[in-house]
Image (cartoon, grey):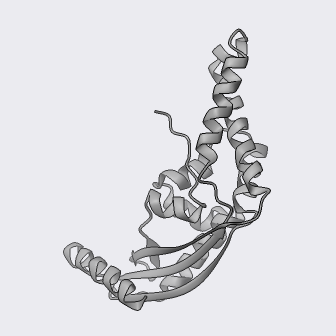
Amino acid sequence: MNGLIGTIVSVLIATAISGGASAMSESEPWEAADAFLRDLAGGEQQTVMMYMDNRYVNFLENVKGTDEEMDRMEEALFRNFSYEMIDSAAKGSVAVVEVKVRNCDFSGIMDDYQKASYQYVTDNLYSEDVVNKEKLNKKCLDLYLDQIEKTASGEPTYENVVYLPMEEDGYGGWRMILNDEIMQSILGELEIPTDE
């Protein structure tokens, strides 16, 4: 496993060299990963706000719903969530943290959501709620939340090892290089609705 982490660090070092070097960090990479995961699961915005450019983080923080709906989503997504720091390696201004995450398997949510949405629309073809975009969006969010809550009521069956690449943030700490694949793995393979 250390060989894989070493390979990832080597790739990150090449990226850092091309972008310039910065001063040594005062905190450890695993501390930044732990703070992010803890704050993400706890609904705290303190650390999570640094990652708003990620589509998943942005969705979780800015979903167009009421406070109650957002609370429902966060509670269900993280009801069975846990993580364990396995290893970390740093060299210069880059690092990688290996984390084992456990959660419910949310990989089937989008299929179930699409079926439920289709059924709702066909059952309500002549209702004004279907042509009212605001009411339809609210109903679709309710259907999506219902699918998440239904899955979260089961046992946590999803387990995955996630590698979090990091770079120094220039202030003595570390910042993860998050992409959608990493966030999807953290969230039990959850797919999020798109506007497309």
Report the residue at 50% width, 88% height from top: 87
The image shows residue 118, relative to residue 71, as above or below, that is: above
The image shows residue 64, relative to residue 80, as above or below, that is: above
The N terminus lies in quadrant: bottom left
Is 57 left or right of 26, judged from the image as shown? right
Please tell me in which quadrant of the rendered image residue 189 appears: bottom right
Report the residue at 71% width, 29% height from top: 139
Q: Residue 156, how many percent across, how many down?
A: 71, 66
Is 119 left or right of 35, judged from the image as shown? right
Q: Residue 114, how many percent across, how many down?
A: 61, 35
Please tell me in which quadrant of the rendered image residue 136 appears: top right
In the image as oriented, which residue stretches furthest toward the top? 126
- In depth, the one of 177 and 80 nearer the eye is 80
Please tell me in which quadrant of the rendered image residue 84 appears: bottom right
- In depth, the one of 18 and 146 nearer the eye is 146
Report the residue at 47% width, 55% height from top: 54
The image shows residue 133, relative to residue 192, as above or below, that is: above
Q: Residue 118, how many percent across, how many down?
A: 63, 26
